[in-house]
């Protein structure tokens, strides 16, 4: 697998709470240069990035991030604002408390509501695997599938753990055929990138793909 092939699956990410405009510009310039799948940036930077880069960049952002317990109406408002400002893809965090309470129907309905708000735009659903049991992960695979979301995503990168190959293999067993997989967090080397892609991930979220492909290791998310 060539570096160029890998980069086409990378959501080039900068979500640190103290990210400056210079950090975002660097990310976007790299995304243009290396033709990554998208840039994943804080909502507050969407319009500025869209105004500067227009269709040179596919913009992804996060909703209900990173804790997930915003009410559904607030998440919908975030989605609508993001799309209006030029975003194309949404990575939402589920209400993890609802998952832990076993309220899977409620979680599924929220995902369905946000997918409706997204329309033809891509919706990725972060289930934050590090906090869930195997049974809860399986239930979330079913909820994401039933709700019509486009991707199931492992992690925010802000929890106690990131993506694991075991979770990706579990996803493959239980998601529907129309649901793709995104790994985030825990991807530290070029070998990791290749392994996750070979296991079936369509996207990988990382801030360090360029460095990894140059022989380095991931730093942060």
Image (cartoon, helix red, strand yellow):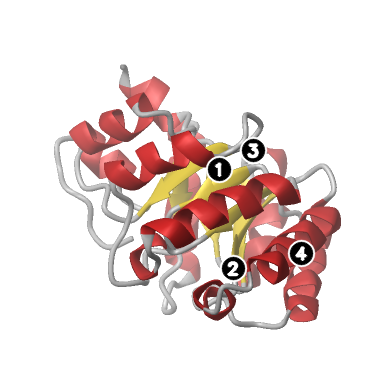
Measured as percent of width and height from the top left, residue 39 is found at 53, 49
Judging depth in this view, the residue of 20 and 188 nearest the camera is 188
Q: Which residue is mark 4?
A: 109
Q: Tell me the distance, in whole angstroms, between the alpha carbons under discs 4 and 1.
A: 27 Å
Q: Which residue is mark 3?
A: 56
Up-down relation of residue 47 to residue 187 (above or below): below
Of mark 3 and mark 2, the one earlier in the sequence is 3
The residue mark sitting in front, 4 or 3, is 4
The residue mark sitting in front, 2 or 4, is 4
The residue mark sitting in front, 1 or 3, is 1
Q: Which residue is mark 2?
A: 94
**Residue 38: assigned label:** 1
Q: Residue at x 45, y 72 (%)?
A: 20
Q: Tell me the distance, in whole angstroms, between the alpha carbons under discs 1 and 3.
A: 10 Å
Does any portion of residue 203 appear in the rendered image? no
Circle 2 SS class: loop
Q: Residue at x 43, y 54 (%)?
A: 154
Of mark 2 and mark 1, the one earlier in the sequence is 1
Label 1 packing within 10 angstroms: few (<14), some (14-19), many (20+): many
């Amino acid at each position: 697998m060539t570096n160029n092939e890998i980069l086409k699956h990378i959501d080039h990410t900068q979500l640190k709470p103290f990210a400056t405009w210079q950090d975002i510009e660097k990310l976007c310039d790299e995304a243009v240069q290396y033709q990554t799948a998208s840039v994943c940036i804080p909502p507050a930077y969407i319009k500025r990035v869209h105004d500067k880069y227009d269709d040179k960049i596919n913009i992804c952002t996060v909703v209900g991030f990173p804790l997930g317990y915003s009410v559904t109406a607030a998440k919908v408002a975030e989605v609508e604002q993001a799309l209006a400002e030029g975003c194309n893809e949404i990575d939402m965090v589920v209400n993890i408390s609802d998952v832990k309470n076993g309220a899977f129907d409620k979680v599924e309905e929220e995902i369905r509501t946000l997918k409706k708000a997204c329309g033809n735009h891509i919706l990725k659903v972060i289930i934050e695997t590090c906090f869930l049991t195997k049974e809860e992960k399986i239930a979330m695979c079913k909820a994401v599938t039933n709700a019509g979301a486009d991707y199931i995503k492992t992690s925010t990168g802000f929890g106690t753990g990131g993506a694991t190959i075991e979770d990706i293999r579990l996803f493959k067993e239980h998601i529907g055929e129309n649901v793709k997989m995104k790994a985030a967090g825990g991807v530290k080397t070029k070998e990791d990138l290749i392994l996750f892609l070979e296991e079936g991930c369509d996207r990988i979220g990382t801030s360090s793909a360029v460095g990894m492909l140059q022989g380095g290791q991931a730093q942060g998310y």
